[in-house]
Image (tube, rainbow, N blue to C red):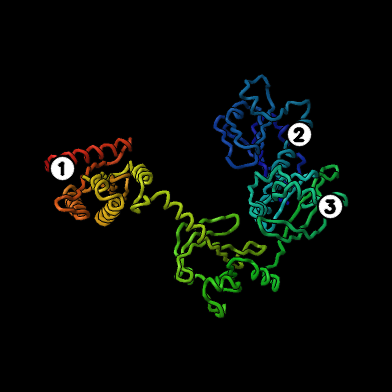
């Protein structure tokens, strides 16, 4: 039993009343300490105390600040007081005799003791629940959860607030069909409430995709009249990983995915044939296989690890080699925990996503690529430009001069060849940019930053020379007109930016035409 010291601060003219209060009968766990208030106007209560203020001086009441519920103010004086004073007073001691006043005082002490004890009981229960390594819960007679502990929320993957006031089916994700078939714990709850006795059960629950075996300890909850109003429960996980033995081996071997089971230091314990095939360690002693070393050397990360703190697992997309071909995998590493919550091992599951990723890649490539030249298409170029609209960029908008004559005089097959070879030269010279065919004989290049004019002119001239060599027939050859636009960032209209490049390209094309004439 905890013991409490209640400080009785007093300022009383009636010394007989004080003597009666000092003889008050209080609960065994309470000790009273009487302290006289010397200066009523300057009286200040300590912030952290269990206190009872007894006074007939309104100056004391004015000074009192009731900062928490563990302060009581008893008044023995004139009750013709302003409202601000009356709101601070809990009880009146202005009764016919000091004996009756003492009874009022004793009642206040008892109520304050009950309030403190209630808080400590709640705090002790909360500390016990939150420090327990097993699941704990309290239910009403109708099956509604009143409270659960941290371990319970970790297991079911729901917050404490979500569990409070919820049914078994909601918390454990039991479907209506399963509930009709008797899945749940209603039968054991009924037995406890019918017998009124604490009982032990062996129960199976499904947690995510796993089935767990629990030893549950359940006891009835009573109201002050002895009536059963619910149950309390503790769930102890007795699913024994180490003793699964042959059953585990059979399960691992028959799962159609590569699986490895390790101890808490990632030393290999079991691996199935598919994992051996993937890692090319068929016939190798499992003790000589270092999973972490193999992963570091053979796999490269494609994404950041995705951590599931509820399931204690890490999932990551990775790429590696399988029979000399590039393959894509989802690597799942999950902790195996004992019933104390300690990590006792890991299991590694590898899912081959190669077919899906290659299909996605082909679809994405088809959507973003010009079929003839292999360059980016107009749609993808617009996306890139939109993404970089707020960054410093340089764009080249180019068009082939006299290309129409190639198609008209020498056929579209030759024209297509010119376009493909032109695309190749642009990609080689501007390998550091996004190169796209916008349509017909129009191309564009997007470069990061505002490129120096001198360097840009050198590269453009080199490109023009390469393009002049793509097609020659006597004195006829094709050339390229290039319009250049730059932005320090903050492009508001992508279409207007591209149109500006088109206009500058057109101005250069007119100069080329004037030079030829």
How far is disc 1 from disc 2 in space, using C-alphas?
113 Å
Give yes or no for contact between labels 3 and 2 (Cβ–Cβ under 8 Å).
Answer: no
Q: Is residue 477 above or below residue 294?
A: above
Location of mark 3 (residue): 192
How far is disc 3 from disc 2 in space, using C-alphas?
46 Å
Judged left or right of residue 245, residue 359 is: left
Q: Is residue 385 above or below residue 17?
A: below
Front in this rendered view, residue 445 or 377: 377
Location of mark 2 (residue): 102
Give yes or no for contact between labels 3 and 1 (Cβ–Cβ under 8 Å).
Answer: no
Q: Residues within 10 Å of mark 3 (few under 14, many from 20)?
A: many
Q: Could you tell which of marks 3 and 1 lies nearer the N-terminus?
A: 3
Asked if one can make out residue 243 in the rendered structure from this viewpoint, the answer is no
Q: Residue furthest top?
A: 80
Q: State the image coordinates of residue 226 (x, y, percent, origin top left).
A: 86, 45
* Residue under the point 24% across and 42% down: 486
SS type, badge 1:
helix
Q: Is residue 353 above or below residue 5?
A: below
SS type, badge 2:
helix
How far is disc 3 from disc 1 in space, using C-alphas?
97 Å
Q: Residues within 10 Å of mark 2 (few under 14, many from 20)?
A: many
Q: State the image coordinates of residue 136 (x, y, percent, origin top left).
A: 71, 53
Q: Residue furthest right?
A: 195
Location of mark 1 (residue): 512
Q: Could you tell which of marks 1 and 2 lies nearer the N-terminus?
A: 2
Q: Could you tell which of marks 3 and 2 lies nearer the N-terminus?
A: 2
Q: Is residue 309 above or below residue 44?
A: below
SS type, badge 3:
helix
């Amino acid at each position: 039993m905890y013991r409490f010291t209640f400080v009785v601060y007093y300022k009383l003219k009636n010394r007989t009343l004080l003597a009666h209060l000092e003889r008050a009968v209080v609960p065994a766990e309470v000790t009273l300490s009487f302290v006289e208030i010397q200066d009523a106007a300057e009286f200040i209560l300590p912030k952290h105390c269990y206190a009872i203020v007894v006074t007939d001086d309104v100056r004391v009441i004015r000074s009192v600040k009731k900062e928490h519920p563990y302060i009581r103010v008893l008044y023995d004086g004139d009750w013709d007081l302003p409202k601000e004073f009356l709101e601070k007073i809990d009880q009146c001691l202005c009764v016919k005799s000091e004996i009756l006043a003492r009874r009022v005082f004793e009642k206040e002490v008892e109520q304050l003791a009950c309030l403190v004890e209630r808080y400590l009981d709640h705090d002790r229960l909360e500390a016990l629940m939150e420090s327990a390594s097993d699941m704990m819960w309290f239910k009403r007679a109708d099956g509604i959860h009143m409270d659960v502990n941290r371990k319970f929320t970790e297991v079911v993957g729901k917050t404490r607030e979500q569990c409070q006031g919820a049914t078994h089916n909601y918390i454990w994700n039991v479907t209506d069909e399963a509930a009709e078939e008797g899945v749940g714990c209603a039968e054991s709850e009924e037995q406890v409430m019918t017998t009124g006795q604490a009982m032990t059960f062996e129960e199976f629950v499904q947690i995510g995709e796993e089935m767990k075996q629990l030893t549950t300890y359940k006891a009835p909850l009573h109201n002050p009249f002895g009536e059963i109003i619910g149950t309390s429960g503790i769930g102890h996980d007795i699913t024994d990983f180490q003793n699964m033995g042959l059953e585990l081996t059979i399960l691992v071997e028959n799962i159609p995915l590569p699986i490895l089971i390790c101890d808490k230091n990632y030393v290999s314990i079991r691996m199935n044939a598919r994992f051996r095939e993937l890692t090319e360690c068929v016939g190798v002693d499992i003790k000589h296989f270092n999973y972490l070393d193999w992963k570091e050397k053979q796999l490269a990360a494609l994404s950041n690890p995705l951590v599931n703190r509820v399931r204690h697992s890490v999932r990551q997309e990775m790429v590696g080699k399988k029979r000399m071909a590039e393959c894509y995998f989802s690597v799942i590493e999950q902790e195996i925990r004992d019933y104390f919550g300690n990590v006792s091992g890991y299991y590694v599951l590898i899912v081959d996503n190669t077919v899906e990723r290659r299909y996605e890649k082909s679809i994405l490539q088809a959507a973003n690529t010009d079929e003839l030249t292999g360059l980016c298409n107009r749609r993808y170029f617009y996306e890139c430009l939109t993404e970089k609209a707020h960054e410093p960029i340089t764009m080249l908008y180019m068009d082939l001069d006299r290309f129409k004559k190639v198609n008209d005089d020498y056929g579209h097959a030759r024209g297509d060849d010119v376009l493909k070879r032109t695309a190749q030269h642009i990609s080689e010279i501007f390998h550091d940019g996004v190169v796209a065919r916008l349509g017909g004989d129009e191309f564009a290049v997007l470069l990061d930053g505002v490129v120096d004019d001198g360097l840009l002119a050198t590269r453009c001239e080199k490109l023009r020379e390469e393009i002049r060599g793509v097609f020659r027939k006597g004195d006829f050859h094709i050339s390229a007109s290039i319009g250049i636009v730059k932005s320090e960032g903050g492009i508001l209209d992508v279409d207007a930016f591209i149109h500006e490049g088109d206009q500058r390209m057109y101005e250069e094309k007119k100069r080329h035409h004037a030079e030829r004439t």
